[in-house]
Image (cartoon, rainbow, N blue to C red):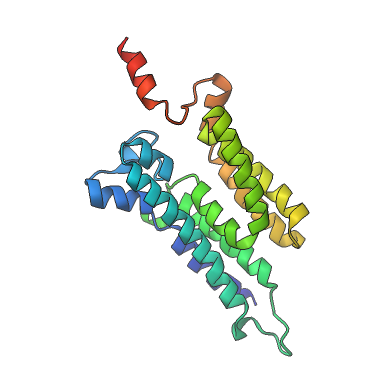
Amino acid sequence: MVNLTLIVAIAAYLLGSIPFGYLLVRIFRGEDIRLTGSGNIGATNVARSGAKGLGIATLVLDALKGAAAVWLALQAARSSYNSCGSGTPCVQTLQIMAVAALAAVLGHVFPVWLRFKGGKGVATALGVFCVLFPKAILVALAVFIVVVALTRYVSLGSILGAVTFPVAAYFLQSTDTVSLLLASSVSLIVILKHNQNIARLLAGREHRFGAGKTAAAEKQL
């Protein structure tokens, strides 16, 4: 049912567009996180601004809003509004969930409340994938953790985790082509939003996690 899919997409977008990083820093520190560091509203920039607790809260809330969007889509897909008679769904449940996943991440990356300038979508993607393809996200998360542990590049871990996810989903989950393409689009958005990080990685100028104090000390020498 096109109408149900459209409603789910709009609801997921609006839920995903809640800018938790911006709101938390504004409420608890009276600052605009967009004027700090990379200008990103995501958890990493919030933490690097000196508010590690708010950074963790941002990560959790951004992930939860993504998970909630896909979970609500699941409930809608199972409801009578998605029935075409004889118990046959008009649209496959997984496809409606995948639409919600993509819409939620788009909402985070392009939030209407902040003139369509949002975050990179990593935490929100984590949330949507946990509900959509839980087995695949475990593999992608493992790649992220290993890469960050070895290199201390959060951006590289995020990029490689995003690359890994659709491959893992293909081999580990029972899915259809449309749902997999929608999920792959989420990964592609995350990768594209890291274009500046990729440029810095290639130039050897990317910031390493936990290296802030060292870098600051070197500037004073």
**Which residue sits at x=57%, y=77%?**
76
120 shown above or below 149: below
For this view, does 181 lie left or right of residue 216? right
Q: How many marks?
A: 0
Quadrant housing residue 74: bottom right
Q: Position of residue 143 (x, y in %)?
A: 63, 40
108 shown above or below 219: below
The answer to whether residue 115 shows anywhere in this view is no
**Which residue sits at x=69%, y=74%?**
91
- Quadrant assignment for the C terminus: top left
183 shown above or below 32: below
**Which residue sits at x=28%, y=43%?**
32
Which is nearer the eye, 10 or 135?
A: 135
The answer to whether residue 157 shows anywhere in this view is yes
Which is nearer the eye, 99 or 137?
A: 137
- Quadrant assignment for the N terminus: bottom right
152 shown above or below 68: above
**Which residue sits at x=52%, y=30%?**
152
Which is nearer the eye, 38 or 54?
A: 54
Which is nearer the eye, 116 or 124?
A: 124
